[in-house]
Amino acid sequence: MKPKTIIEPFKIKSVEPIRFTTRDEREVLLKDAGYNPFLIHADDVLIDLLTDSGTSAMSAKQWAGIMEGDEAYAGSKSFFRFEAAVKNITHMKYIIPTHQGRAAEKILFSIVGGPGKYFPNNTHFDTTRANIEFSGAEAVDLLNEVGKHPEIRADFKGNMDIEKLEAFIKEKGAENIPLCMITVTNNSGGGQPVSMQNIRETKEVCKKYNIPLFLDACRFAENAYFIKKREKGYADKTPLEIAQEMFSYADGATMSAKKDALVNIGGFLALNDEELATKCRNLLIVTEGFPTYGGLAGRDLEAVAQGLLEVVDENYLEYRIRSVEYLGEKLISLGVPIIEPPGGHAIYIDAKRFLPNIPADQYPGQSIVCELYLEGGVRASEIGSVMFGKYDKNGKLITAMMELVRLAIPRRVYTQSHVDYLIEIIEEVYNNRNKLKGYEIIYEAPILRHFTALFKPLR
Ligand SMILES: *Cc1c(COP(=O)(O)O)cnc(C)c1O
């Protein structure tokens, strides 16, 4: 039988119109925003690919849950539904709701972190690193070599380097490593998956030295689907069974529900250690709220519980991973340089290869981001020297390792024709690449400058 087109596994019952603008209007809007798409009003964007975080479309059942939310301060019915949904996937004993992933991180690392402590990970996400460093501890990335090469195609480019991990534990001493993390999928490394074998082997090393293993589980379902498709022995298992096995090797997890729980706000901390859970709950009461709502409304807990059921649906995951892959394939066939293979939640354009004539200190990624907006009202984010650039003692820019443009795909929001339009816009920008100019920064904040920096196009 001829394979059929993979379709959106939903029909649309509520729509949000998007606003069309002309190129002339966008010229003015972009200039007024200081050539920084973060400063453009979302209403002036046609297709918004700034992030996949908190931008999911909720289902009819999730919206029904919003109405059913039990807003009791303590012991709300919605909490127990939420708790059961998280337990079903993680099989962990203590489930602590938080308002975002970073709130779970803040609580966890306030307790286990501190000066002299080390936390290895395949690649720490920015907020995880920030929370570890804020506690005075050190965050260390031990990504497998292949994950560091954007042009190499491999199945599991998010894997931890097991040998480096063991050497690291021996060097720093297990007593100084309160826990080890694995981020699934590896967000900062391009949304690349981690294999079950790698999670298992990481656990074996951790167990040998008595170090708990935690998952940064934001995209656990996307990771489970990659395992199903790519790892031997998993083709006949359901995404839920695979996710359960992933969590079975972990002693705890942090999660941003804004990703694979298909909601607009929420998160949690899942733990097996009773003593640690008690400490976390006590801190939660100070910073987030009572342990049965933790910084969320009862209705949010309902939406997370339902989202966790929907996200492990195989038809959803097939559509999700395939739609990102489809975008990647088309761009590759046009010759547009991207990180290969496509990850789970985003496509990363390699701006260095796209614009070889614009040096890193003239921000080639920013140039592409601006042009995507001008050409088609598309908003993407620069992940390069604007975001990660630093200055040396003499005020000279130290550029980032890579110059990337991220096209993050919101879940269940855009259809294939949106993606086809996006491909046409990128093609147009690529064909005009010799006309693109670099940018200079005319204002920047001392930290996290990419959010508010103002730019000027170079002539
Ligand atoms: C988004 C994210 C976080 C932080 O979650 P927030 O809900 O944004 O606070 C942590 N880790 C990873 C891998 C993420 O993608």
Image: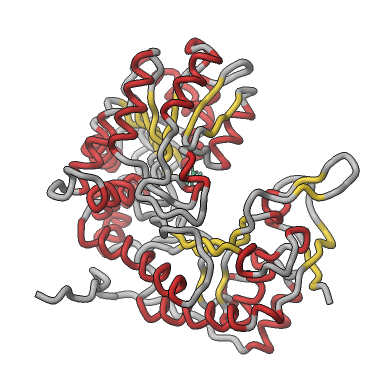
Q: Report the residue at 36% width, 27% height from top.
A: 202
- Is residue 360 shown left or right of residue 169? right
Q: Position of residue 273 (x, y in %)?
A: 34, 18
Q: Is residue 306 above or below residue 276?
A: below
- Is residue 434 shown left or right of residue 106? right
Quadrant where the N terminus sits is bottom left
Q: Report the residue at 50% width, 28% height from top.
A: 120
Q: Is residue 312 above or below residue 363?
A: above
- Is residue 393 shown left or right of residue 204? right
Q: Is residue 216 visible?
A: yes
Q: Quadrant of residue 127?
A: top right
Which residue is more in the foreground, 171 or 270? 171
Q: Quadrant of residue 72?
A: top left
Q: Position of residue 240 (x, y in %)?
A: 20, 45
Q: Position of residue 295 (x, y in %)?
A: 46, 40
Quadrant where the C terminus sits is bottom right
Q: How many marks?
A: 0
Which residue is more in the foreground, 292 or 364? 364
Q: Is residue 299 visible?
A: no
Q: Position of residue 325 (x, y in %)?
A: 37, 65
